[in-house]
């Protein structure tokens, strides 16, 4: 029977308002490749951060090679032979490959006060050989290397450190390594991982389920912070994993579907063949008044870039955007605002709000010109407008003068929405509007989105989960690798299941 | 999961630009081609402007002699810039070290006559000042820009108080003889500066401290994560720089055979320009002692040429200002900086 190297028992971790992990058990055996899958937001990230000691679990036991440990941080984890390889590698770009490999551990190469560069280069070459990079000159600067190389160097570094600290059978976590790789590079990575397996264990995280199925000895499926399945090799196929990832059927009333009004009236926003080189191509969309369209796709599918172009923060390389029949060119967010497009960004604290300003200032930020009496701003008008939107959007704040930083996530989001409503935006782009918001506040946001659509606003939305996308939208566009691959209608009462959709997404 | 890790982007294009950028950065850090070209251009302009006078052996010797002290100062500042910090205490610390050294070398005001033993003692004072800079920067977590600006004025104030505002005559002639002397027609000051440059170069390229300096300048968070004691390295760098300032102070007062509490005045700007012109990235991690040498040579040749061409000193100042801005514009990848404060 195989022997567990790393074992988590009953790990729970909560953040304010969200339980990210709920009593998770995870076992990694010796010489094993463990596939870890789950939707965005399922808790994979949090779980791995617990494994590398970046987070400490609220509850549960962490056993390494049979002994309970309490890791103080990622460097502790590395010393214990547990390390994570990030997509782009985690290396100082201006240093050489060998400097990065041995960074902070050059003691072994000291000759008096100096470093023996020759010996260091030899050791680096030997270490690189192990991961199939024998031909790479260890004196090359890391900054210009492709991501595939950086990943390999990172793996080499972790292997070397585990040798240095004498941890046998190290555990390497690879976080979506293949998304930055070309096909041939992926094949090479898999070949090397197959080799590495003989003296290490690997946790392999990927959205590409075919890869997970073909590579992994065992697959753990995570959903909503719970391990929903632990499948042996051969018992897992892509459709069954998809079903497990998506989980239960849609609850009908969860997204306030009874309030779903559906598109009415004229086309508010018309996008034709919009492209941004290297990011997405040929994106077209007719968005009508009152319509909610969900953009679905993995990170990097191009949906975020579409929204950046619509919001004016990035200039498309070709194609046109017309608003109510008028072709518009956005050279900056200001133009998009003037055209009536409001973007509610995913990163509320940094991009959506001036958190150090008070609620009133944030709400009135875009309409200050209307708050004027003569050349001066009128505090009375500002206050009036602020109070109106605070009650309209049901923002829970002690006063209009409260700093936004002190509000809860849900209320901050309402302030952002109020800002755009005050600016009379006709088209809203909602980038993960419920990210980091607790359940109750989520429902309020859903209701608010329905009301806005009923009032005739056109909305483009990108959500945390497929369920949310499907539940909120009148139709969804599925994007993959920069192209729209599918349009799926989601009318009230006729919603597809996430399972119908996920096949197009991954 | 990947949303915590950052952008992914179009692969092909991404790699292409990354490679191009790496080539540019290694061009700046390893090869000195850009600096050589710049030096050649400046030499050519000055030669044309002065009808070849600027290239006479006598004037070349003058240039080397003029470059010595600025090079020492530049070598000091560039170390701090390499770790991604800034040092604006230069002038104050040099003034303080000048006054201390003035009191320790034979003079009419005190009974001390330590001779060359004044050098290590002044270096200790400079190192101490640098140590305080580093401590305030790392332990009180004060931006180095502010910490060193403030402490520089403290040092300047101490220099004035200690000397009561007087200049101090140096009665030991050996200092002046040395600084104004030559070895095989090469001015002693530039030799001292180059030896210092060679030592710093060796530290940068061949020691752990040097590797850590580059790592911190390249990405401080990653360096810390890798287990480097970032604070200790930064404090050490500030302290070394302080010692280097002390050396500059001694050369400075020896040349005039007189010390005064304003010795450091107007010395920082040319050195900072040389740092930038030499291609040391102001965001840290790129460049080294060799860049400081070339930067100082370029700036010195330019200023010497302008004097020979009888350009008004006010215009000279303006030219230097423009050179600084252009040099920084060429070395910083401003696209990577989201907000410029």
Image (cartoon, grey):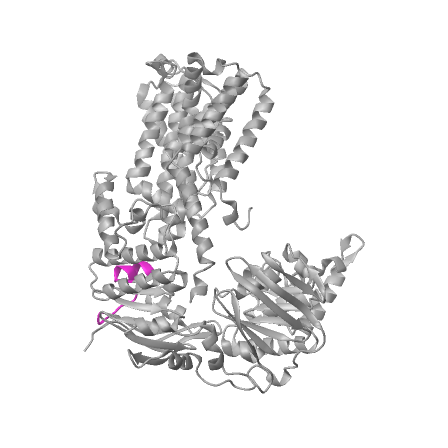
The percent coordinates of residue B316 (x first, y second) are 57, 24
Please identify the quarter of the rendering in which residue A222 is found. bottom left
The percent coordinates of residue A67 (x first, y second) are 22, 70
User: Split into 4 quadrants, where in the image is the C terminus of chain A?
Assistant: bottom left
Q: In the displayed image of the protein, which residue is found farthest to the right?
A: A374
The answer to whether B179 is drawn above or below residue B137 in the figure is above
State the residue at coordinates (44%, 35%).
Answer: B279
Give the magenta-colored segment's residue range: A65-82
The answer to whether A85 is drawn above or below residue B85 in the figure is below
Q: Is residue A326 magenta?
A: no
Residue B129 in sight here: yes
The percent coordinates of residue A187 (x first, y second) are 32, 63
Name the one closer to the observer, B243 or A427. A427
Please identify the quarter of the rendering in which residue A232 is found. bottom left
Residue B169 in sight here: no
The percent coordinates of residue A159 (x first, y second) are 25, 58
Q: How many marks?
A: 0
User: Split into 4 quadrants, where in the image is the N terminus of chain A?
Assistant: bottom left
Name the one closer to the observer, A349 or B335. B335
Name the one closer to the observer, B57 or A378. B57
Q: Is residue A217 left or right of residue B39?
A: left
Q: Is residue A347 left or right of residue B81?
A: right
State the residue at coordinates (58%, 56%).
Answer: A317
Name the one closer to the observer, B166 or A31. A31
The answer to whether A297 is drawn above or below residue A492 in the figure is above
Q: Is residue A75 magenta?
A: yes
Please identify the quarter of the rendering in which residue B180 is found. top left
């Amino acid at each position: 029977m195989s022997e567990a190297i790393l074992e988590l028992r009953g790990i729970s971790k909560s953040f304010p308002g969200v339980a990210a992990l709920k009593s998770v058990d995870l076992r990694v055996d010796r010489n094993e490749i463990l596939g870890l899958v789950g939707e965005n937001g399922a808790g994979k990230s949090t779980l791995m951060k617990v494994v590398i000691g970046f987070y400490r679990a609220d509850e549960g036991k962490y056993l390494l090679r049979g002994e309970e440990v309490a890791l103080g941080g990622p460097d502790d984890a590395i010393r214990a032979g547990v390390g994570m390889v990030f997509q782009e590698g985690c290396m100082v770009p201006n240093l050489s490959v060998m400097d990065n490999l041995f960074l902070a551990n050059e003691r072994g190469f000291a000759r008096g006060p100096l470093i023996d560069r020759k010996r260091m280069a030899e050791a680096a070459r030997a270490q690189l050989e192990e991961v199939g990079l024998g031909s790479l000159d260890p004196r090359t600067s890391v900054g210009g290397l492709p991501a595939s190389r950086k990943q390999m160097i990172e793996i080499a570094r972790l292997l070397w450190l585990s040798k240095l600290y004498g941890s046998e059978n190290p555990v390497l976590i690879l976080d979506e390594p293949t998304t930055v790789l070309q096909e041939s590079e992926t094949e090479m990575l898999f070949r090397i991982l197959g080799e590495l397996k003989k003296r290490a264990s690997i946790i392999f995280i990927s959205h590409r389920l075919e890869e997970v199925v073909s590579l992994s000895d065992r697959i753990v499926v995570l959903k909503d912070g719970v391990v929903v399945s632990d499948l042996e090799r051969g018992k897992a196929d892509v459709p069954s994993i998809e079903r497990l990832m998506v989980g239960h059927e849609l609850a009908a009333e969860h997204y306030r579907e009874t309030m779903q009004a559906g598109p009415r009236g004229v086309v508010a926003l018309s996008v034709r063949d919009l492209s941004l080189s290297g990011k997405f191509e040929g994106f077209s969309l007719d968005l009508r008044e009152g319509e909610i369209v969900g953009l679905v796709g993995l990170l990097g599918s191009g949906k975020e870039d579409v929204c950046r172009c619509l919001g004016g923060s990035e200039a498309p390389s070709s194609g046109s955007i017309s608003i109510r029949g008028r072709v518009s060119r956005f050279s900056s967010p200001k133009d998009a605002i003037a055209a009536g497009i409001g973007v509610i960004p995913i990163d509320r604290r940094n991009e959506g709000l001036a958190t150090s300003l008070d609620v009133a200032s944030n709400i009135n930020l875009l309409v200050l010109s209307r708050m004027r009496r003569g050349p001066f701003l009128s505090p009375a008008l500002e206050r009036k407008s602020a109070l109106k939107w605070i009650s309209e959007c049901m923002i829970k704040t002690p006063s209009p003068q409260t700093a936004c930083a002190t509000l809860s996530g849900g209320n901050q989001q309402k302030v952002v929405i109020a800002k755009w409503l005050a600016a009379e935006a006709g088209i809203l782009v909602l980038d993960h509007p419920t990210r980091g918001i607790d359940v109750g506040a989520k429902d309020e946001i859903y209701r608010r989105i329905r009301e806005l659509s009923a009032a005739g606003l056109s909305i483009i939305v990108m959500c945390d989960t497929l369920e949310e996308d499907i539940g909120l939208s009148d139709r969804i566009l599925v994007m993959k690798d920069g192209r729209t691959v599918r349009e799926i209608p989601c009318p009230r009462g006729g919603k597809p299941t996430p399972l119908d959709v996920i096949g197009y997404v991954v | 999961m990947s949303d915590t890790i950052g952008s992914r982007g179009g692969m092909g294009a991404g790699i292409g630009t990354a490679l191009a950028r790496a080539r540019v950065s290694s061009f700046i850090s390893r090869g000195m081609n850009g600096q050589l070209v710049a030096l050649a251009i400046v030499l050519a302009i000055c030669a044309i402007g002065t009808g070849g006078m600027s290239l006479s052996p006598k004037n070349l010797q003058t240039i080397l002699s003029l470059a010595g002290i600025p090079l020492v100062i530049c070598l000091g500042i560039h170390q701090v810039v390499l770790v991604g910090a800034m040092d604006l205490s230069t002038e104050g610390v040099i003034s303080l070290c000048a006054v201390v050294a003035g009191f320790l070398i034979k003079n009419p005001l005190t009974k001390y006559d330590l001779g060359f033993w004044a050098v290590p003692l002044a270096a200790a004072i400079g190192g101490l000042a640098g140590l305080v800079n580093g401590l305030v920067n790392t332990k009180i977590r004060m931006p180095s820009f502010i910490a060193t600006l403030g402490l520089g004025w403290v040092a300047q104030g101490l220099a004035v108080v200690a000397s009561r505002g007087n200049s101090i005559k140096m009665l030991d002639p050996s200092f002046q003889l040395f600084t104004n002397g030559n070895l095989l027609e090469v001015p002693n000051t530039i030799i001292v500066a180059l030896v210092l440059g060679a030592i710093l170069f060796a530290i940068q390229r061949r020691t752990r401290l040097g590797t850590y300096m580059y790592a911190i300048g390249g990405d401080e968070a990653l360096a810390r994560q890798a287990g480097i004691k970032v604070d200790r390295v930064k404090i050490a760098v500030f302290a070394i720089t302080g010692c280097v300032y002390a050396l500059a102070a001694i050369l400075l007062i020896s040349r005039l055979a007189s010390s005064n509490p304003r010795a450091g005045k107007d010395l920082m700007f040319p050195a900072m320009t040389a740092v930038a012109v030499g291609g040391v990235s102001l965001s840290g991690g790129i460049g080294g002692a060799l860049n400081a040498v070339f930067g100082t040579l370029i700036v010195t040749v330019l200023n010497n040429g302008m004097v020979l061409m009888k350009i008004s000193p006010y215009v000279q100042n303006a030219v230097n200002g423009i050179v600084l801005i252009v040099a920084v514009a060429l070395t910083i990848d401003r696209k990577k900086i989201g907000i410029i404060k």
